[in-house]
Image (tube, rainbow, N blue to C red):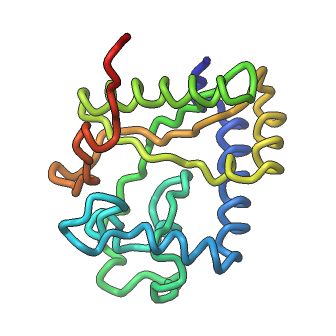
Amino acid sequence: MWVKPITESEEEVATVFLISRAEEIERSDPEYVAELQRWLRTDPAALDGVPVEAVPSEDPATRPSNWLIRDFVVGTREPHGHFLPEDAADAPPPAVERPTVVLLGTESDDRGAWLLSGQALGRLLLAATVEGVAASPLTQALDWPATRTRLRSRLSLVGYPQMLLRMGYPSTGDAPHSGRRPVAEVLRVEPAG
């Protein structure tokens, strides 16, 4: 198991390009878009899914960041123009997001490696939560075999990329959190013996 921060300019450009390319492929698939929209949780009592309040109101493509985040309402927003409204001309530019992006990988690409990477991801996300760090997956480039293979090649990886995470301190203190199921609903402990 290994963790690689994406810090070099060439690595960032290659990774951003492959994420964008994979996102483009996904957006052209109506079944994918429908599945993505099913992940939205509009019922406050529901535990599964992404809370609708957590989805940014602006188009992710307009965010001041190189790292494209997944758009759960793709195709439902008004198209944005390239011109600023008159009252925005004198406003200071928005702060540019500078997230830390890390790639988790394994030496092999079998079920054991997938389990190991899932365990490592769980530990990393728990440690991040304790420190007040938000994390969001950037898995688009890993969802498609061609872009995953190109990512491995472009970053000269020895091993297989398993998870790409965008991490940083959130700018808002009270961002909506995703629901958590009770432990008894997701784990079953059998008596030893």
Q: Nearer the viewer, residue 16 or 10?
A: 16
Q: Residue at x 52, y 31 (%)?
A: 118
View extreme (left): residue: 174
Q: Residue at x 36, y 77 (%)?
A: 89
Q: Nearer the viewer, residue 107 or 103?
A: 107
Q: Nearer the viewer, residue 174 or 12?
A: 174
Viewed as shown, does residue 174 lie left or right of 71?
left
Quadrant for the C terminus, please: top left
Residue 137 position, x and y percent, is: 50, 46
Q: Residue at x 24, y 52 (%)?
A: 177
In this rendering, is residue 163 above or below 38? above
View extreme (front): residue: 193
Figure quadrant of residue 57: bottom left
Residue 95 position, x and y percent, is: 36, 54
In this rendering, is residue 71 above or below 4? below
Count of numbered circles on the image? 0
In this rendering, is residue 179 above or below 184? below
Viewed as shown, does residue 49 lie left or right of 175?
right
Residue 11 position, x and y percent, is: 70, 36
In this rendering, is residue 74 above or below 14? below
Whether residue 17 is visible here, answered yes or no, is no
Residue 98 position, x and y percent, is: 44, 43
